[in-house]
Structure formats: structure tokens, C-alpha cells
Image (cartoon, rainbow, N blue to C red):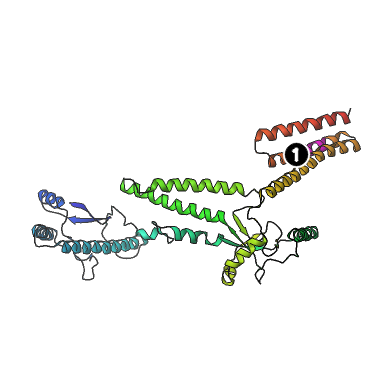
Amino acid sequence: MSVYRDVEKEGCRTSIAEADHGDEAASSRSRKRSYSGDIRRESPGGVYNNDSRPNSIRSVRRDRSAGRDREYNPSLSSQHVRSSVNSRLERRRSFDSTTAGRRRSRESGHGPPGPMVTESYQMPLPRNVRHTMHLDRDDPGDWAVNHHLPNLIARLDEPEVSSVGSKLNDWSTKLREIQYGRKSDPTPSSEDGMRFRISFAEVQRMRIRKLQCQLVRHVVKMRLNGSESPGWEQTLEQYIKALQDHDYMESRSKSIRDPFLATGEYGVDNYVLNCNIDSALAKDITKHVDSLRPWDVRPAGANDPITGTRGSNVAKTWYRGFKERIVIAAAGGAFLVGPMWIMVLKNGLYASLISTTAFVTAFGILMAYFLDEAKDVLASTAAYAAVLVVFVGTSNP
């Protein structure tokens, strides 16, 4: 009968098949031992020789006797035991590879037939094979920097300024000359004329990624050890706070000037960036972004607040809101006056129906773009359609 015994060593499990034609008592004693001899005969090269089969009873008894001697010999050192186990595992791996090759030969129809071998477990891949990126699990800071490295600094593309925009920029420069009481002296810039932008929001995202790696490490440790990982609560609090800070940074991006952008579009920011970015780094930056506004030229030494003064910010916010309200008023008037003119000038049933359908559709799409709530979109579109229906009834009695 064939008895399969599992030998476990350093997380690797293998199955060793021994042929036992002795009595059941001897088989029971051999299974109770945690360490026994390998009964397979091997070739001089360390590969199992299928042509030479051992005398089962004599080999089993000889190996069991040797196992008892090793087990009850007090002079046998632990180092010798470990080396013996390691050599046995190496022989088993060699045997498995040879068996797999023979199995493939049998399946393909080539090669001599060999004995059928039952495998109870497949050798796992080394742990390092799973790691495709160099991440220090205990200190992921360097990996986080390399992960976000291309997005830290970007090069600005020069904006296309129209003739009207160029005139407005010239007038703005003259107003600054009057404000500072002298002719505008441009802020020192780089000779190549390149301007750059640094987003501190990207740095915050890099911090969130680092905290995420640390938090994952804490959870894995707790799952493996079944106990608390030191500092996991502090890491979780930092992770939540970092996400809240990122939400605040997103809200500030809607302001007049984003304080979390150091961009070369502003003269003083451009001067600070050029003082820190040398020629070698400038050539290495490959990411390009569009400019949000015309490039600014500030007088040298001008006191330009980084976030602007409170009065100027309030004035700019009001002026921007005023322009938006003007645009909305013009669009609303066009949606009401336009259909009315068409129905009056093209007095007909089809003209009224086509114009009403087209304007209601356009108005609904516009409301869906600007409004957040679906009920607000439905209410405004229905009200506008009701007004146009009144126009249709009065123009076609």
C-alpha cells in the first residue's frame, strides 16, 4: 500500500510517497515520527532515477533504523538536522521538476512513459516576485516621491493673447506704472523665457499616498499578528485630516487666485521659481500645462501680496460675480425675446412649433449644465415652456 506523508519546513509543503509492504504497526510508528529518511533511491546527480527501484521492505527498514538512530542519538547537533532537512527538500524539488518534465512529455506523446505521481500541493512563488515596484513597506516616503515625481513641476505653455487682450495688458501695465510712481522694470526672468508651475495640491496628494501605504501596512500587521500595530490610530487620524485638507484645497481653487499654485504667470512667483530651478532641471521637465491667464510682468521689488489684500479680493470677487450676472441676464433675455421675434415675423403654426421646441430643448440643456438638482432643472424648464406656449397661443389665434 502507498502511504503519503507531509513534511513541513519553512512554509513549504511537499508530499513524499513511500512504499510500505510491512505490517501496519510499523507504518503507524513511522507516521508518528516527525522526521524520517527518504526511501527513494537517487542517481549520483541528485535526480530521481526511475530505472532503479529500491527493495521496498529492506529499504524501509534500513531508513527507519537510521531515522531512529538520528532521533535518539543525543550527540546529533541541531545544525546537522537542519542541513539534512534542507538537503532533503532540495532533492524533493529536483524530483518535482523531473516529474513535471516527464508529465509534459507524456501529454505531448513524446518520451518514455513514467510512473504516475500524485501532487498534493504546488510550490508557491517566492514572495519577492509579487513586488513589481521598489516600495519600502516601513518607510514609503521615497516611493511616494518617485510615484508623483513627473507631476510636481510642470512647464507653462505661452498663452495666445488676442489684440484686445494685448491692449488690456498694456493698459494694466501703465496703471501699475502710475501706482508705483515709476516706469515698470520687469522682474528678472530666465534667459530661455520658460515659465513653470508647482502645484502644492499634488504634494498633498503625495502625502495622502504615503499615509495610505502606512495605513495598509498597519492593517496587514494586525491581520498577521492578531494584535494592535503601534501607531495605527495616529496614522488613521492623519489620513482623514489629509483628505479634509485636500477638500479645502479644492474649494480654494475656485477663488480669484489659487494660493496652492506657485505659477510663473505671476511676476513674483516666476522670479521665485527661476531662482530655484536651474537649467539642468528646466531641460528635464517634460510635462506641459496651459496658462490660465496672460503672463504677468511685475516691477522689480514690487510688494505683491501672495494672496492679495482683503479689499482687492472683495472687489475682484464682486466684479467677477457682476460679469456672470450680466451674462445670465443676456442669455435669459435672448431665450425670451428670440422666440417672440420669430413668431411675430414668421407668423405660422409650423414656425411657432419648431421655434418653441428648439428653444425649450436648448434651455433645458443649459439648465442641466448650470444647476445641480434635478428638480430645479425640471421646474425651470417647465416654467420656460409654459411661457412659450402662451406665445404660441397669442401668435396663432
Tell me where residue 220 appears, x and y as whole percent: 37, 49
Is residue 53 at least partly visible in the picture?
Answer: no
Q: Nearer the viewer, residue 172 or 67?
A: 172
Label 1 sits on a secondary structure element that is helix
Q: Quadrant of the C terminus?
A: top right
Q: Is residue 355 magenta?
A: yes
Residue occupying image coordinates x 16% and y 59%: 37
Outermost top residue: 397
Q: In the drawing, does residue 11 fall left or right of residue 72?
A: right
> Where's residue 112, x and y in %?
29, 65
Is 8 included in the stretch rendered in magenta?
no
Q: Residue furthest front?
A: 181
Say left or right for 311 vs 5: right
Q: Would you name the residue on which mark 1 appears?
A: 363
In this picture, residue 327 sits left or right of residue 101: right
Q: Magenta stretch?
A: 353-360
**Could you tell me if residue 95 is visible in this image?**
yes
